[in-house]
Amino acid sequence: MSHSPTSILVTGGAGFIGSNFLLRVVPHYPDVAFVNLDLLTYAGNLLNLKAIEDAENYTFVRGDIADGGLVNRLYDERRFSTVVHFAAESHVDRSIMDPLAFVRTNVVGTATLLDAARKTWMNDGSFGDVRFYHVSTDEVFGELDDTGEFSESTPYDPHSPYSASKAGSDHLVRAYHDTYGLPIVISNCSNNYGPFQFPEKLVPLMIVKAAAGEPLPVYGKGANVRDWLHVEDHVDAIDLILRNGRDGGTYCVGGRAEMKNLAVVETICDLVDEALEREVGTARKQIAFVADRPGHDFRYAIDPSKLESELGWRQAHTFEQGMRETVQWYLSNREWLDAVMDGSYREYLAEQYG
Ligand code: NAD
Ligand code: TDX
């Protein structure tokens, strides 16, 4: 059953994936009204949205998804047909240092949005053409050893406070569907890379540090494996699932691009050397193996075949080309980098790496 959005609440639209989503859909659907609700934590940045900030079909509201008064008022006033829920605390290392912040935003915040949807959208005992889209992660499935892939039927087995809080939010979304009949879809995606990612995550952190000649902190032996997907391919999948995914359905999204962390870092090193016209091999000398992340999941890999066969999704970026463009983007957007690397970021880095 397809869904035709008329008015969309996007949460966390100033973050990495949310801003890439808005940059694509706001110009693409001029007849759809978009409200971006974002608290602007350290990870949210309105600079990401410069290209659409004056669009007639776009409004920004600064606020907390766990603030029931604000959320209920927005639903009442704006009569959303649709929620696309990105807002979250998203960094695993931070969740180890401050787990309760993750429970608050990821669990309580999601529950607040769901409950407002239930109350506003239920009319004479039924829901019309409305949809709550929950953006989630492959980390809810736990970790794999050397073989196998996660799919829609993989049991949940989260290990970090981040992934446990995301698993909790997924369960709540499904509970609102099963208990109240709230129309929902969920997608669980692998690691994203691309423009506008806060430089605490592996890819932008390594690009920035490689270019600056600083040590590149690789956890453990760099043997952990992640499955990489360009953020624009994720955003494409979200738009497709939002409109054409089955009610109550779950979709796994991944890039079929599994790599050991060390190989990702070495690729970035060589691309940075090339771009800065240095001798290739220079940045690799900066690699520094550091203490492992506690509870570090060994391997993630996604089988996206349901999304491919049911909805015809195909990724447009290869890892090689996507990473080359991403390195170029960070090296040529110094102004953006300087703006996001504010005091709190430096403090955090100092805390993490001394
Ligand atoms: P991000 O950290 O870059 O952005 C999160 C955004 O949410 C920020 O703009 C922040 O200001 C906002 N936010 C945080 N707490 C809030 C609150 N209480 N109220 C309102 N806004 C709040 O995250 P991201 O990487 O863009 O991830 C977006 C979503 O996608 C998350 O739900 C994450 O779990 C999921 N996801 C991310 C990846 C990835 O590789 N980055 C992969 C799969 C799934
Ligand atoms: O400095 C580092 N050194 C390092 O070796 C950092 C920041 C990371 N790593 C390792 C840890 C992981 O194995 O690189 C891998 C990727 O790390 P992150 O970029 O922190 O991502 P990850 O922990 O895999 O989680 C990401 O993908 C799933 C996102 O942050 C989540 O929001 C998403 O749900």
Image: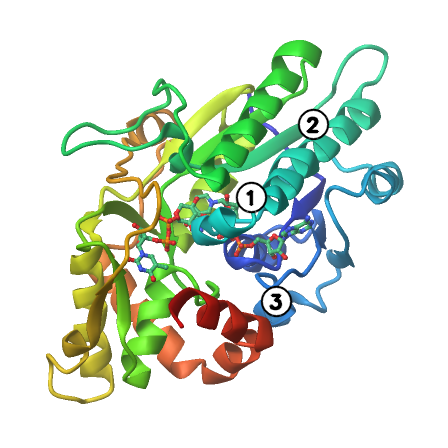
Question: In 3D space, how far apart are the residues under numbered discs 3 and 2 (Cα atoms)?
Answer: 29 Å
Q: Which disc is residue 130 wearing?
A: 2
Foreground tag (1 vs 3): 1
Badge 2: few (under 14), some or many (20 or more) residues near its Cα, within 10 Å?
A: many
Q: Can the viewer see residue 87?
A: no
Relative image position of residue 15 (x, y in whole percent): 56, 58
Question: In 3D space, how far apart are the residues under numbered discs 1 and 3 (Cα atoms)?
Answer: 23 Å
Provide the residue designation for mark 1.
99
Q: Nearer the viewer, residue 187 or 43?
A: 43
Mark 2 element type? loop
Mark 1 element type? helix
Provide the residue designation for mark 3.
45
Question: Type of residue at label 3?
Answer: Asn
Which residue is depicted at the point 60% across and 59% down? 27
Earlier sequence position, callout 1 versus callout 2: 1
Question: Type of residue at label 2?
Answer: Val
Q: Would residue 146 appear left or right of 115 to someone viewing this image? A: left
Relative image position of residue 177 (x, y in whole percent): 63, 17
Q: Decide: is 186 above or below 282.
A: above
